[in-house]
Image (cartoon, helix red, strand yellow):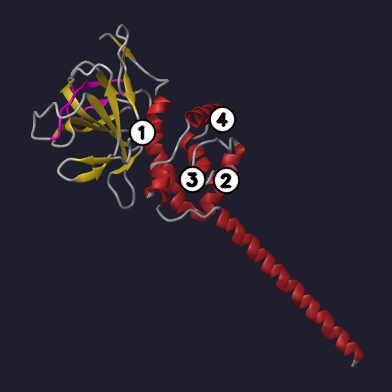
Amino acid sequence: MIYAGIFMKKYYYVVLTILLGMICVYLTGYMVRSSYFIKENLVETMEFRNCKIRTKVLKDAKEVAEKRNYDFSKIIAVNFLENNNSLTKLHLKGKNVKRSEKMYIQFSNQEYQKIYRGFAAILNDLKYFPVAQSRSSEYWVGYDNSFGADRNFRGAYKHEGCDIMAEKNVSGFYPVISATDGVIENIGWLPKGGYRVGIRSNHGGYFYYAHLSAYANIKRGDRIKAGTLLGYMGDTGYGEEGTKGKFDVHLHFGIYIATENYDELSINPYYILKYLEESVLYADY
């Protein structure tokens, strides 16, 4: 009986040890999965659409991508997720990016791919600030972060872009250029946007230029290069074709991406414009 009792105690200890081991393995796996969990359609939330992106992060990521021959937007996507859905600092570089990416692919591949494709559409084709600067005039442009601000034309709505305001309030003065390579997908009059151009970039982003005073020699379907003249900054819109003067001269610049539930989902272009300020083309005007 004594030996039987000792045996039973040992048996219970063994079983308990096994159970505790299984619990530890489960909890460890749960913690790992939780660390690399991405909520469904994060790409469609304001966390993504209105993400604060520091210019230094984009510059550093571009440098890492070029040095290591790695995808720029993968570096951005992984850092966005690792930094609690923000891009105020570049935490991971090089091998650490690839290691984290493998974990996201393992545990949340579908959602990770949505985030990656979203950043690629926004960032991969950017080259130039969308307004050329004069070689001779002191007049330039200014802009604030007006994404999401209240607007009203035929009903209240939220501003889906960034207004680049003219210091010289003269229609037809400032050349508007394409920020990316791409194809002219839309051109012509919109009651709200006036004379506008919509360009689909190579990675799927839709770049929108509105309130133009006039067009350059372009047409729908043209494949163009970044820096191509699209037209001139104006004050058209808020009415039937030809309406102008309802507001100060400016360029409404918008960026849209396609997602699971939206054909065109607006992204805050303010931080993109800050990044592109270091890539300005000059023109004679």
Viewer-nearest of discs 2 and 1: 1
Q: Is residue 247 left or right of residue 259?
A: left
Viewer-nearest of discs 2 and 4: 2
Closer-to-camera residue (15/171): 171
Closer-to-camera residue (70/156): 156
Q: Which residue is mark 2?
A: 100
- The overriding secondary structure of the stretch rendered in magenta is loop
Q: Residues within 10 Å of mark 3 (few under 14, many from 20)?
A: some
Which residues make up the magenta segment? Answer: 218-238
Q: Of callouts 3 and 1, which one flags the residue occurring earlier in the amino acid sequence?
A: 3
Q: Which residue is mark 3?
A: 85
Q: Residues within 10 Å of mark 1 (few under 14, many from 20)?
A: some
Give percent across and percent down for residue 277. 40, 22
Q: Amino acid at mark 1?
A: Asn
Give percent across and percent down for residue 227. 31, 20
Instruction: Using the image, determine if residue 247 lies above or below residue 114.
Output: above
Q: Secondary structure at mark 1?
A: loop
Viewer-nearest of discs 4 and 1: 1
Calculate the distance from the C-alpha at mark 2 to the C-alpha at mark 1.
Answer: 32 Å
Q: Which residue is mark 1?
A: 145
Q: Residues within 10 Å of mark 2 (few under 14, many from 20)?
A: some
Q: Which residue is mark 4?
A: 68
